[in-house]
Image (cartoon, rainbow, N blue to C red):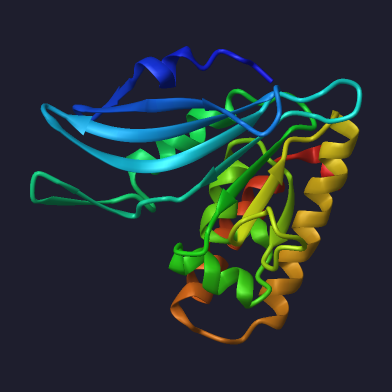
């Protein structure tokens, strides 16, 4: 993992807003830190989300990042900002995704992300869910839906994305995604709004994968 977190700690600017880590705390392990990310404009600031970063422990554990406690409705001086599907979300996901190297994981909580939640509950392939599609476009090609935490420390529902370890594995994972979404398009007849959105992404993704000659 690229360990340069100075930008988010010092603050990054988007649309006149400053996104920054107001607090940086040690985690449960020496390799882990916790960030509380805030949004600020002029003298107004609001909590945006939490980030947990594990830098890895060689040779046993690879680095990972978890994004959680997401504040979807942010009131900034009587102006309501929506996080999901915004430039704010794109900036956050893009920033943390670029820290990853091959075989490393991101976990993003989705329990209050209505569209993603409905899509994953309906067993729609993660790569064409609202959140999963964003992660796919950022280079993540393997997904796991943690819809039911298996212990006591995992927190709420989250989607896990992993960047491919190598090009051979990437092709294998892209083939699997291609097969899953083709099956989805053939077998799914429902026309709920969240399914329609997933179908639209599926068609775009299939079209883009056709240009990857190594897949077929």
Q: Is residue 212 above or below residue 83?
A: above
In the rendering, at what x and y percent does residue 128 appear? 60, 59
In the rendering, at what x and y percent does residue 20 appear? 35, 26
Is 148 left, or right, of 131 in this rendering?
Answer: right
The quarter holding residue 100 reads: top right
Is 205 left, or right, of 186 in this rendering?
Answer: left
Q: Is residue 21 above or below residue 4?
A: below
Image point (61%, 31%), residue name: 27
Is 167 left, or right, of 200 in this rendering?
Answer: right
Most foreground residue, 208 or 118: 118
Most foreground residue, 69 or 196: 69
Q: Is residue 162 above or below residue 58?
A: below
Image point (76%, 25%), residue name: 56
Most foreground residue, 53 or 184: 53
Image point (83%, 44%), residue name: 215
Most foreground residue, 73 or 29: 29
Quadrant for the N terminus in the image: top right
Is 162 left, or right, of 194 in this rendering?
Answer: right
Number of numbered tags placed on the structure image: 0
Q: Which residue extends farthest left?
A: 78
Q: Is residue 189 above or below residue 95?
A: below
In the rendering, at what x and y percent does residue 26 appear? 58, 26
Image point (60%, 53%), residue name: 132
In the rendering, at what x and y percent does residue 89 appear? 40, 43
């Amino acid at each position: 993992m690229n360990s340069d977190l100075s930008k988010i700690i010092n603050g990054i600017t988007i649309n006149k807003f400053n996104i920054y880590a107001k607090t940086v705390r040690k985690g449960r392990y020496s390799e882990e830190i916790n960030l509380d990310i805030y949004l600020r404009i002029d003298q107004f600031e609001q909590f945006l989300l939490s980030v947990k970063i594990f830098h890895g422990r060689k040779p046993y554990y690879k680095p990972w990042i978890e994004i959680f406690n997401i504040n979807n409705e942010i009131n900034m001086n009587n102006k309501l900002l929506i996080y999901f599907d915004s430039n704010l979300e794109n900036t956050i996901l893009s920033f943390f995704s670029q820290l990853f190297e091959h075989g490393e994981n991101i976990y993003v909580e989705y329990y209050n992300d209505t569209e993603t939640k409905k899509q994953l509950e309906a067993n729609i392939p993660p790569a064409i869910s609202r959140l999963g599609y964003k992660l796919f476009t950022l280079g993540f090609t393997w997904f796991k839906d943690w819809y039911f935490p298996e212990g006591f420390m995992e927190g709420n529902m989250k989607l896990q994305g992993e960047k491919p370890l190598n090009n051979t594995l990437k092709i294998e994972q892209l083939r699997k995604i291609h097969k899953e979404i083709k099956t989805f398009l053939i077998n799914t007849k429902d026309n709920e709004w969240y399914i329609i959105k997933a179908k639209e992404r599926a068609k775009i993704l299939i079209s883009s994968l056709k240009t990857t000659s190594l897949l077929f």
